[in-house]
Image (cartoon, rainbow, N blue to C red):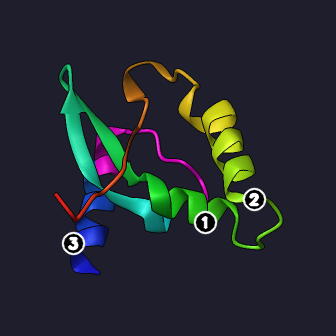
Amino acid sequence: MEEETSTFKVLVRAGSLLVAGLESALIGYSERRGVIVAVYNLDECLELLNEDESLSYEETLQWFYGNIHSKDFGEDTPIFVRLDYNI
């Protein structure tokens, strides 16, 4: 938990854009063109967005890509990654 807290502090201090409601999917930060940006676990984001299971996986994915991933927030746009532990 301490690592998550320090990551959060770094992002807040840097003025990075954080996505409300997806805090537990935050896995770290990266630097893009000199700007510190938030990095999220994509699969956790999808789980959080559909906690009540009201949408299918495909519908959740479509909503995510249409409403979060495709938005350009400029230099502060977060990074969403898929973690594949089978590499």
In the picture shown, does residue 60 fall above or below 78? below
- Give percent across and percent down for residue 25: 44, 62
Please state which amino acid type lies under the numbered disc 2: Ser
Please state which amino acid type lies under the numbered disc 1: Leu
The quadrant of the image that shows the N terminus is bottom left
Residue at which label 1 appears: 48
In the picture shown, does residue 44 fall above or below 34? below
Please state which amino acid type lies under the numbered disc 3: Glu
- At a point 59% along the width and 53% down the height, the residue shown is 20
> Main SS of the magenta segment?
loop
User: CA gap, disc 2 to disc 3?
Assistant: 33 Å
40 or 19: which is nearer to us?
Answer: 40
**Of helix, strand and loop, which one carries label 2?**
loop
- Give percent across and percent down for residue 10: 25, 52
Residue 77 lies in the magenta stretch: no
Nearest-to-viewer mark from 2 and 3: 2
Residue at which label 2 appears: 56
Residue at which label 3 appears: 3
Nearest-to-viewer mark from 3 and 1: 1
User: CA gap, disc 1 to disc 2?
Assistant: 13 Å
Mark 1 or 2 closer to N-term? 1
Q: Which residues are magenta?
A: 11-21
**Of helix, strand and loop, which one carries label 3?**
helix
In the picture shown, does residue 21 fall above or below 18? below
Residue 71 lies in what quarter of the image?
Answer: top right
- Give percent across and percent down for residue 77: 43, 30
- State yes or no: discs 2 and 3 in contact (Cβ < 8 Å): no
- At a point 67% along the width and 57% down the height, the residue shown is 57
